[in-house]
Amino acid sequence: MITSILKILLLITGGICYFNTVQIYSDSTKVIGVVADAEDASPLANVLVKISGSSQNVFTNIKGEFSILLAEPGSYEIEAFLAGYKTTKLPVEIKQGSEIVFYITMLPAGFSTDVITVTDEHHRSAFDDMLELSAVLKEKELLRDMGQTLAMTLKNQTGISIRSMGPAPSRPVYRGLSGDRVMVTEDGMKTIDLSATSPDHSVTVEPFTVERIEVQRGPKILIKSPSAIGGVINVIRNEIPQEVPAAINLKLGGFGETSNKGWLGSGVVIMPLKPFALRLEGSFRRTSDLKTPAGTLKNSDIKTINLAGGLSIVRKWGFAGFSIREYQTDYGIPGGFVGAHPNGVDISMLKRQYTFKLHYKIESKFLDHIDLDAARTYYKHTEYESANVIGAEFRILDYNLFANLLHNETGIFNSGTFGVSFETRNFNIGGYVFTPPVNSYNTALYVSEELRASDDLSVEVSGRFDNNIIKPQQQVQLANLDTVYQRKFNTFSVSASAIYKLGKWWSAGLSLSRSSRVPTIEELYSDGPHLAAYSYEIGNPKLDPENAIGSELFVYYKDDTKYAMLTSFYNEISGYIIPRNTGIVNVATLLPVYQTTGVNALLAGFEAQLELKLSKKFEFSSSLSYTYGEIKNTSSPLPQIPPMKGESELTFSTGRLSLGLNSEYAAAQNRLDDFEQPTGGYVIFGSFAQYTISSGKLIHNISINAENLTDKIYYNHLSRIKSILPEPGFNLRMTYKLLY
């Protein structure tokens, strides 16, 4: 009976505003309702209904009905999630009464900026919301764009390019910035590996089991690092559960490609053990050598095992928990040319990480809560020249600790964070040793504040002080370097941004920053052959920190059918540290010599994004990005700057079914540093189909992608192996996920 009545109400009030606060007066805290399709008023089954501020979440039955018992009255937000539909949120104020009856309508997915938010909404800023529109990969987009690596998954995002030495050793490059200038984190914690320091090292992140990926910019990134001039890529998987689910949640999935005969299988289960929550995760990936239109890229196979478990206790005061993750991967680096091993190099990587998180709510007028994050990470990277011959072995033992206090509105400050972090790292190399063993220490103090000057103006400021000590375990003299000695660095970074609402639909903003990056251990002390990277590397123990002065100007428009954003950026970096090809070949190894040096650099460019809802079923999106890099002293080009790049896509959606055509295009890159190879421009085309099936409590999500439909030969300018073979040709990829 209730379903019929609510269906009539839905038809009458189809234009209801979902975000109006509902005032309910009841003696109990029982919540019942119906979730229905906004277009035809049909009930929706298997909708995940969550109550924010509580640990309650349930699935609707076949009639779209649900029932939730809350612990106590208060202010809540009800959220409804279903694949193929826009997320719906409904604030509810529960006061004295008997029973709460309401309904939720959900629109089929189309043009939407609704998101599943895992960050604390209380401390979201206007800048966070802007980035949400432009730089977040989630839900259906994540399923569709899923690749073999994190970089491949992000390759269609505005401003992002890929640095690679094959399928496995690939890393995102943002606005021409690479290495640790673009920091990768998992659930807010720094990813410990060596992918930022060398092109042959893989990122130790399994993208298939994540919930969401964010590209973070602005003042708040100083909380994580002063060196992330290009931003932070945060991978969110909620490895340590923050809520106790009402029932067992199960996610199974699979992934397959034809270009490398690659496949993956994974499973994630979240179990309620009140007041505890348990999350278990496992995946296995296997690929063969990559096929290109010009031949097979030999020794480019991948095998990865990823296992994790997280346990937390969830109470009214917050949650506390720990997790264990082990990531193992074996992959190949191609060879067969001058400077490389004839058969390439085989690499084996292991990362074992223990993480602890505490989120404790503070009953205080000023303080909101405290976050405490700690991690111990062991990382091992072994390079084999042949079956049992070790060329180099890298080992890291890293300890990280973050303590953050978040406060409520006070005075001119809307909200803010202040905290402290500590990191210690033991770095060792075995095999053909070319970098001495080193201990490094970092202590940091930071603050980030949001000021609300008016209803239309939001201001965010952050500051950070870092003390860094890089201490070789012994003073030694290397072949091409003076005596290696301890270095100490004290750096200060500051950043500010402002966003102003120009009208109902328009907003504009400005960001300014001054940041510092301390040289890495490899940049300071390397001296010897690195076969897997095809280089003989010579560091510089006298390097000073990079100091960057950056600015970003942006304007964006958003209404119910259109979204557009234009961003320009300008960075001047003194002491910009780069390994430059000297043109010299080491006689003993036949490897090209790369000398680490600091130059005064300029990086500037723009990004443009457009999304249009052409009709109820058709959408169009497009983006374009360009980066200009220059060595200011000589006005010569910076090395490894990506060419102008763009993407376009036309999508047809009917709720559960989505079909699309897309294209990727890049200009030629002829602005080259010495000894760099030019690359031509290209246009490649692709298509995709996605379908969602609901069956009882099961939800099936299927995505089929066809890439490089014409089997075109093209080259990635940032590939270190582009002289061997081009990028992959025609590729058919299928992704499947089962939700229970």
Image: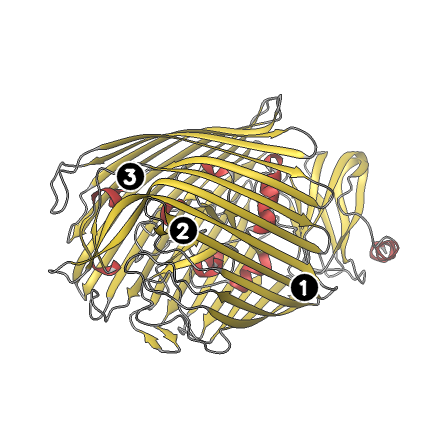
Residue type pointed to by label 2: Gly
Name the residue rendered at 33%, 68% in the picture. Answer: 301
Residue 94, horizontal then vertical, whole percent = 76, 36
Q: Classify mark 1: helix, strand or loop.
A: strand
Is disc 2 placed on a helix, strand or loop? strand
Q: Residue at x 56, y 41 (%)?
A: 119
Q: Mark 3 is on which residue type? A: Arg
Q: In which quadrant of the rendered image does the C terminus lie?
A: bottom right
* Mark nearer the N terminus (1 vs 3): 3
Say if 245 sits above or below 365 in the image.
below
Structural distance between the alpha carbons of marks 2 and 1: 34 Å
Is 482 placed left or right of 301 in the picture? Answer: left
Residue 324 vs 360, above or below: the answer is below
Dot 1 and dot 3 residues touching (CB under 8 Å)? no
Q: Residue 112's x, y, as percent?
A: 67, 55
Earlier residue among tags 3 and 2: 3
Give the quarter of the figure containing the N terminus.
bottom right
Give the structural element (helix, strand or loop) at label 3: strand
**Is residue 225 visible from the viewing direction of this image?**
no
Image disc number at residue 425: 3
| Residue 118 as seen in the image, left or right of residue 527 | right
Disc 2 vs disc 1: which is toward the camera? 2
Q: Which residue is mark 1?
A: 619
Instruction: State the residue position of label 2.
Output: 629
- Could you say which is closer to the camera, residue 142 or residue 230? 230
